Image (cartoon, rainbow, N blue to C red):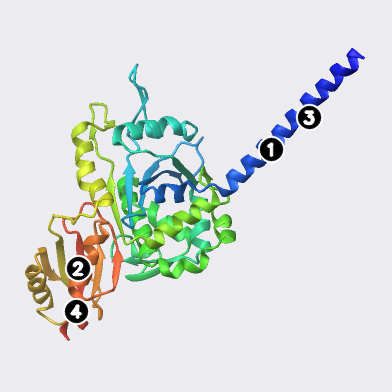
């Protein structure tokens, strides 16, 4: 009899344990499919930060491209901080052990995030890891993108001056074919693509469905759930502007990129404050004006307008490009606010993005024949 009672107790314990496992499993699945940390952060008016790692090809999860995406739903703004591949990731504060970002596998993403959080004083709860094949698929699924070309690529590569339709492969070619394979020039090209998508986002609304988004991100490694990605897309559609920068820092004697208090404070003042707070950029917008028509005097006429509005004209002259009928505004520094202000002053809506961080001017305006009217 005692033996039977013991067996009954064991069965009872096993049954209770199984029930607990099932209940916990149901609770986990429920939480997973209903969790939306993006909406929670947005409702708490917190900045949403996501680490993005990308490569052209698989190399044991070592990536040449890193960036932090910042979303501020309260101010309807988005920021992008590019992280140099020679950034020195602190692995152990006590011993001072550190390695270059490019040498680390993304399997160590928690170490990378911890170091970035410590250096930049922000919280990064999410990550996305993708490859060129993922980007190609996404661009093809939205039926390509129209990129504006002047002279940033060789015309014998299948491009012409003006708008060029690019499918996924051609877009990735555009990003990667830069002088000396410079990662900084690739940053600029990536912003050309990102800003073009952002300013034309109304064209892509038809692709926003759970089924379509699931197909787009199916092969991407991320800790974001589908419903959270859709919420992020909603944030993008509500956003009015985009800020971009390279992570603050300086080179040490071994050519490693490190962050100190001075560079971090500059980053907070110049980048994070405008992203988070409702403040206007105090720096004067620098404009380059080129007469792209065959009508003399139009660049000078526009210069006078820009000067009266308080903008700084750093150059005006004749355009070396094909004669154009329509005036176009080109965002050269990735600061969308600057380009939008020039657009507002001139009453011209045609805007493209050819980001070149080495340029002095924030905005290039190519004056067309329409400006003579």
Q: Nearer the viewer, mark 2 or mark 1?
A: 1
For marks 2 and 4, give the CA distance: 19 Å
> In terms of secondary structure, where does tag 3 sit?
helix
Q: Going 36% across and 71% down the picture, which residue do you hit?
A: 163
Q: Are marks 2 and 1 in contact (CB under 8 Å)?
A: no
Within-10-Å neighbours for mark 1: few <14, some 14–19, many 20+: few
Q: Nearer the viewer, mark 2 or mark 3?
A: 3
Task: Farthest residue to the bottom: give it.
Answer: 373
Location of residue 338 with respect to 85 vertically, above or below: below
For marks 4 and 1, give the CA distance: 72 Å
Identify the residue position indicated by label 1 in the image: 23
Q: Earlier in the sequence, mark 2 or mark 3?
A: 3
> In terms of secondary structure, where does tag 2 sit?
helix
Identify the residue position indicated by label 2 in the image: 342
Image quadrant where one finds the N terminus:
top right
Q: Earlier in the sequence, mark 3 or mark 4?
A: 3
């Amino acid at each position: 009899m005692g033996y039977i009672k013991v067996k009954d107790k064991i069965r009872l314990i096993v049954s209770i344990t199984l029930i607990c496992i099932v209940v916990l499993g149901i609770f986990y699945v429920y939480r997973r499919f209903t969790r939306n940390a993006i909406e929670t952060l947005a409702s708490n008016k917190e900045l949403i930060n996501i680490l993005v790692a990308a490569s052209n090809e698989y190399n044991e999860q070592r990536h040449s491209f890193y960036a932090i995406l910042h979303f501020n739903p309260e101010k309807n703004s988005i920021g992008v901080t590019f992280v140099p591949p020679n950034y020195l990731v602190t692995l152990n504060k006590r011993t001072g052990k550190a390695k270059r970002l490019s040498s680390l596998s993304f399997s160590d993403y928690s170490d990378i995030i911890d170091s970035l959080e410590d250096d930049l004083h922000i919280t990064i709860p999410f990550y996305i890891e993708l490859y060129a094949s993922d980007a190609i698929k996404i661009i093809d699924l939205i039926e390509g993108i129209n990129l504006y070309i002047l002279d940033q690529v060789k015309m014998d590569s299948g491009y012409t001056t003006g708008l060029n339709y690019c499918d996924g492969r051609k877009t990735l070619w555009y990003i990667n074919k830069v002088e000396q394979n410079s990662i900084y020039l690739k940053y600029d090209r990536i912003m050309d693509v990102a800003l073009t998508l952002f300013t034309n986002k109304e064209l892509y609304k038809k692709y926003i469905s759970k089924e379509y988004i699931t197909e787009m991100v199916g092969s991407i490694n991320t800790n974001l759930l589908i419903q959270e990605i859709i919420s992020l897309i909603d944030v993008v559609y509500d956003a009015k502007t985009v800020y971009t920068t390279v992570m603050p820092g300086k080179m040490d004697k071994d050519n490693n990129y490190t962050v100190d208090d001075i560079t971090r404070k500059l980053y907070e003042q110049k980048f994070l404050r405008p992203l988070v707070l409702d403040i206007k950029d105090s720096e004067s917008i620098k404009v380059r004006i080129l007469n792209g028509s065959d009508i003399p005097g139009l660049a000078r006429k526009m210069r006078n307008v820009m000067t009266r509005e308080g903008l700084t004209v750093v150059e005006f002259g004749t355009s070396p490009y094909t004669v154009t009928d329509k005036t176009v505004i080109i965002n050269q520094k990735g600061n969308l606010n600057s380009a939008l202000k020039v657009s507002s002053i001139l009453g011209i809506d045609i805007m493209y993005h050819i980001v070149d961080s080495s340029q002095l001017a924030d905005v290039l305006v190519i004056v067309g024949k329409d400006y003579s009217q």
